[in-house]
Image (cartoon, helix red, strand yellow):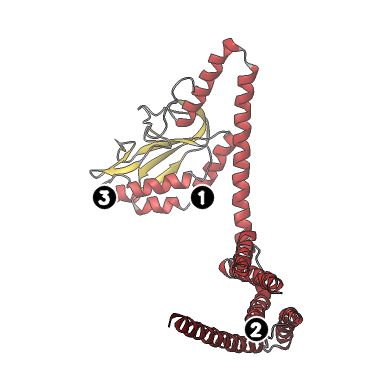
């Protein structure tokens, strides 16, 4: 008799414990309400899709590299490696590049010349703004006053002078060059820049932006200094 | 004594590990079911201590109470009256009463045992 009572109590307590735990679980993790409206969701979806396609193109590129490595015999392996290194150098912005692009000139505005206002250099903020504006376009290469702008480049104020890669940007007029993958891209960038509101920002600083027509061949010099590598390390050989 | 406790621990761990979640709509029902189960449990312990424990009453009470409470909550939801509060109130009061009775019985037992050991010692 006692034993059966114990079993009954055990079963009931098991049920009670289970139900309490489930209740606890349900209380502890209230599902966060999704308050995004349809446009926010569409935007998220769009950004995910963009990411997806970027990843896909990256995969395609890497697949191509693998294929090259596979199809080559031993003698040509060295050449394939050199090709890859060249490609990486090109990506890092170390090599000279030639391609379709546009040349933009920064000049002091006509009013400031007429009024005899002193010409000041372009401010780092304005230059950064312009670079951000350009960075809307993917895989473009550009140069500011002869200084190659790469991923590691910085626009800074050093002792009152605006610098790119630590080198002074001369007082206007100076020119900037942009190279895009295709001529059509150059046209797109040209159209965008002609209509851009960035002109107003330049005008406030008594500068004007002269966007040149797209050209078939624009040349940009490579990043002249050695790239500093702070985070990547070479693996010991044979591992 | 240990077997029921083991059951409780087992139940809790099972519930926590299985990571089951009840939709928020049914939260009320589950909380009431837990309360009904606890009420029946303490009722059973009391009956056991008072030596009036009956298997049928215990088991039927357990399921019937849960069903009744759930039905009441369901009705309440559809009538727009928080009827489940009535069930919570009833079960809560009974829970306290049962626990009070259990406490008294245990106290009496304890004092009696003290007396017995005292008389044995003398």
Residue A171: % across, % down: 30, 40
| Residue B23 in sight here | no
Give the residue number, with chain letter if any, for mark 1: A195
The residue closer to the viewer here, B98 or A105, is B98
- Asked which quadrant contains residue A74, the reply is top right
Image position of A191 with respect to A22: above or below: above
Residue B21: % across, % down: 65, 66
Residue at x 62%, y 83% (from the top left corner): B49
The residue closer to the viewer here, A106 or A21, is A21
Mark in front: 1 vs 3: 1
Same chain for the residues at labels 3 and 2, yes or no? no
Measure how far apart labels 2 and 1 are at the Cα level. 82 Å
The residue closer to the viewer here, B36 or A222, is B36
Q: Chain of mark 2?
A: B
Callout 1: few (<14), some (14-19), or many (20+) C-alpha neighbours within 10 Å?
few
Q: Chain of mark 1?
A: A
Give the residue number, with chain letter if any, for mark 2: B43
Q: Residue furthest top?
A: A75
Residue A50: % across, % down: 61, 46
Measure how far apart labels 1 and 3 are at the Cα level. 27 Å
The residue closer to the viewer here, A47 or A16, is A16
Q: Secondary structure at mark 3?
A: loop
Residue at x 54%, y 15% (from the top left corner): A79
Give the residue number, with chain letter if any, for mark 3: A117
């Amino acid at each position: 008799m006692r034993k059966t009572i114990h079993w009954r109590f055990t079963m009931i307590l098991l049920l009670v414990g289970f139900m309490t735990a489930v209740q606890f679980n349900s209380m502890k993790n209230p599902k966060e309400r999704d308050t995004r409206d349809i446009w926010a969701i569409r935007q998220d979806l769009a950004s995910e899709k963009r990411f997806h396609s970027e990843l896909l193109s990256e995969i395609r590129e890497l697949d191509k590299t693998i294929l090259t490595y596979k199809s080559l015999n031993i003698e040509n392996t060295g050449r394939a490696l050199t090709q890859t290194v060249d490609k990486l150098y090109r990506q890092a912005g170390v090599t000279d590049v030639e391609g379709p692009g546009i040349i933009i000139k920064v000049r002091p505005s006509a009013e400031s010349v007429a009024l005899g206002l002193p010409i000041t250099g372009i401010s780092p903020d304005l230059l950064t703004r312009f670079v951000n504006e350009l960075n809307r376009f993917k895989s473009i290469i550009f140069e500011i006053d002869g200084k190659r702008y790469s991923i590691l480049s910085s626009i800074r104020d050093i002792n009152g002078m605006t610098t790119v890669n630590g080198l002074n940007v001369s007082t206007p007029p100076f020119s900037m060059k942009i190279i895009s993958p295709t001529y059509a891209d150059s046209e797109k960038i040209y159209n965008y820049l002609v209509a851009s509101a960035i002109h107003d920002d330049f005008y406030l600083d008594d500068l004007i932006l002269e966007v040149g027509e797209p050209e078939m061949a624009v040349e940009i010099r490579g990043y002249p200094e050695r790239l500093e590598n702070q985070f990547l390390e070479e693996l010991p050989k044979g591992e | 004594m240990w077997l029921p406790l083991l059951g409780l621990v087992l139940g809790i761990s099972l519930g926590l590990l299985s990571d089951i979640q009840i939709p928020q709509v049914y939260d009320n029902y589950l909380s009431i079911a837990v309360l009904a189960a606890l009420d029946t449990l303490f009722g059973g312990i009391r009956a056991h201590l008072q030596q009036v424990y009956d298997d049928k009453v215990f088991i039927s009470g357990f399921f019937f109470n849960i069903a009744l409470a759930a039905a009441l909550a369901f009705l309440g939801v559809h009538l727009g009256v928080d009827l489940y509060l009535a069930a919570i109130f009833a079960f809560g009061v009974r829970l306290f009463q049962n626990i009070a009775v259990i406490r008294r019985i245990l106290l009496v037992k304890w004092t009696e045992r003290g007396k017995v050991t005292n008389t044995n010692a003398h």
